[in-house]
Image (cartoon, grey):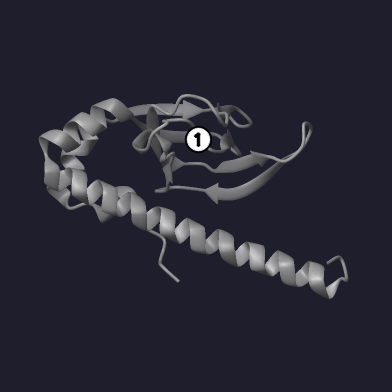
């Protein structure tokens, strides 16, 4: 299994410093919706403190938490790929402080500095690979539990 990657610590110092020039400090109160599936994805965050749950709407009344993120984790990757829409929803599970990055500004910086762009895309790919592996493991555990219970 891949190890958890933290965006800001994974980037070389010079590239991290360039990226941080675009950072804006923001906060979200507990229980606030940060974004909804299908919304315009034009930014991302690095969580400084607190916890965020990513969720998926499964029925008109029910959302299921698909991942939990905390300090150092990157929140949001849809800003990087067309059609630039959120795939999941996100809610602050506790008070959250984060660095916010404007997606188009980061993409422009990546064009200006291709090494930064390559490092950023590779790091995001590693983050996504780790999350995919974690989710796959959780699904397999749920499948095993349901199978043992005779539910499937």
Residue 103 sits in quarter: top left
Q: Tell me the residue that label 1 is attached to.
A: 96
Residue 34 at what x, y percent from top left? Answer: 53, 29
Can I make out residue 85 in this image? yes
Can I make out residue 6 in this image? no
In the picture as drawn, the residue positioned furthest to the bottom comes out as: 148
- Residue at 59% across / 38% down in the picture? 94
Q: Is residue 127 left or right of residue 123?
A: right
Query: Which of 35/17 is in front?
Result: 35
Q: Is residue 13 left or right of residue 35?
A: left
Label 1's element?
A: strand
- Residue at 17% across / 33% down in the picture? 109
Quarter of the image for the C terminus: give it: bottom right
Residue 19 at what x, y percent from top left? Answer: 22, 37
User: Total number of numbered labels?
Assistant: 1
Q: Is residue 148 left or right of residue 27?
A: right
In the picture as drawn, the residue positioned furthest to the front comes out as: 83
Query: Which of 45/40 is in front?
Result: 40
Residue 99 at what x, y percent from top left? Answer: 36, 34
Query: Vertically, is 40 above or below 4?
Result: above
Quarter of the image for the N terminus: give it: bottom left
- Residue at 72% across / 41% down in the picture? 58
Residue 147 at what x, y percent from top left? Answer: 80, 72
- Residue at 52% across / 25% down in the picture? 39
């Amino acid at each position: 299994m891949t190890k958890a990657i933290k965006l800001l610590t994974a980037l070389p110092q010079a590239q991290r410093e360039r990226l941080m020039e675009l950072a804006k400090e923001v906060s979200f109160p507990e229980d606030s919706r940060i974004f909804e599936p299908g919304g315009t994805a034009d930014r991302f965050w690095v969580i400084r403190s607190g916890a965020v749950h990513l969720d998926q709407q499964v029925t008109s009344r029910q959302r299921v938490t698909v991942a939990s993120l905390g300090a150092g984790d990157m929140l949001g990757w849809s800003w990087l790929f067309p059609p630039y829409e959120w795939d999941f929803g996100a809610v602050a599970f506790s008070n959250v402080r984060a660095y916010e990055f404007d997606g188009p500004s980061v993409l422009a910086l990546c064009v200006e500095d291709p090494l930064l762009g390559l490092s950023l895309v590779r790091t995001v790919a590693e983050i996504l690979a780790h999350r995919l592996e974690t989710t796959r493991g959780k699904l397999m555990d749920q499948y095993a539990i349901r199978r043992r219970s005779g539910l499937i």
